Image (cartoon, rainbow, N blue to C red):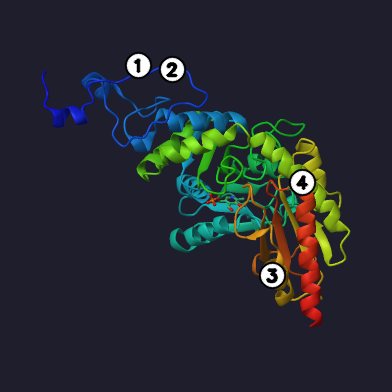
Amino acid sequence: MKIKSQTALIHAPRQAPQFISTVQPPLYRASTIIFNNTDALFNRHWTDAYDYSYGTHGTPTTFTLGDNIAQIEGGKYCLLTPSGLSAINLVNSCFLSQGDEVWVADNIYGPNMEHLRNLETRYGITVKVYNPIDVDTFTPSANAKLIWLEAAGSVTLEFPDLTGLVKKAQAHNMLTALDNTWGAGLAFNAFDFGNEHLSMDITVHALTKYPSGGGDILMGSVVTRDQKLHHKLFRMHAIQGICVSGDDVAQVQRSLASMQLRYENQSKSALQLKDWLKQQTEFVQVLHPADVDSAGHVYWSEICKEGHSAGLVSVIFNTQYNMQDIRNFCDALQLFKLGFSWGGPVSLVMLYNLKDMRVLEHSHLQDGLLVRFCIGLEHPDDLIQDIQNALQHMHQQKIE
Ligand SMILES: Cc1ncc(COP(=O)(O)O)c(C=O)c1O
């Protein structure tokens, strides 16, 4: 058919051959996906592994990243979401119904707890809180449906008794969901862990952290090994219109190649910092799961690979330092920037008052204000120097 130039601009008549081999997979951006013919339109089915029917349901770009994340985490199926929190939300909205009981660790990522409290008020779901290092505090009723685990908790960094908790949840026919952001699929295999080869049912991962690695992309994932669970999540994902941008996916895909190197480097730097922090008199506790004095260390050492302990380390300041002192300390840091999140190239710091954050009493946590350091890719000697300078500045301000 002979077409006018205006139409030719839209239906580009010449296209280079489509298949070449490149280091990174090609990037597809799509809302509309064009069917070759009506057979293809009517024969499509949402349970097909790669259902190319509309942009929200996936493109080769999103399925490629999803497959890679599933593989890294030891699962089979993966759905991508616009943030880590939306991945958590997808699991909660998919599996919790009125009357259900859901269990969360007291050190769970705060917005997950907030989301569940919101469901509790609006939809009659009961939220119960357990101590992640004490299985006896987890006492599910007949209505218990789901337990959330996080290993390690991202502020106080207790490594939970995953084996004890998962075995008990399975004995009560509960679903197990792990926030796998800290381990990133590298520290341990959530779908085959410990001596008894236990498996989570579901993992969520804030790809915003280590997989993105740039501090500039928000994304999440939900991984499963069971097809039925995946299909339920897939349906909910589709009807809620959850989707991610192809451009963002391509950036995360590109960063995946260096994820393990970055994770190991940040783990190593955090260990060096943790050893140094332990020698400073300002802190009554240094929290890091690979440290023998940290709560849950024994569970970490049972399950995690040596040298894989992420880039987070927290300290609790002696109670002689008040909020103003801690603020002076944080404001004096130069390399550590004040900001939420972790897993990027720039080291971050955040201050917390645990009294506002915990429901249960925790004998393993001392009184005092908490500061969390998220180690970036700077040289650890410079980071130590930065903390040392800021501590000196804090003391100086106290004297003046
Ligand atoms: C442990 C953990 N899970 C989930 C999230 C949520 O990720 P996002 O920021 O992508 O919503 C965060 C973010 O800080 C986190 O620390």
Q: Quadrant of residue 131?
A: bottom right
Mark 3 closeness class: few <14, some 14–19, many ≥20 residues within 10 Å: few
Q: CA distance from mark 2 to mark 1?
A: 8 Å
The residues bearing labels 3 and 4 have C-alpha atoms spaced at a distance of 29 Å
Query: What x and y, as percent, mark residue 301?
Result: 81, 40
Residue 20 is marked as 2
Residue picked out by circle 4: 269
First in residue order: circle 3 vs circle 4: 4
Q: Tag 3's secondary structure? A: helix
The label nearer to you, 4 versus 1, is: 1
Please tell me which residue is depicted at 70% across the width and 59% down the height of the picture. Answer: 372
Relative to residue 352, is residue 79 depicted above or below? above
Contact (Cβ within 8 Å) of mark 4 with mark 1? no
Q: Earlier in the sequence, mark 2 or mark 3?
A: 2
**Left or right relative to 205: residue 79:** left
Residue 5 place in picture, x, y as percent? 14, 28
Instruction: Return the disc, 4 or 1, that comes first in the chain's sequence.
Output: 1
* Badge 2 element: loop
Name the residue tied to disc 1. Answer: 17
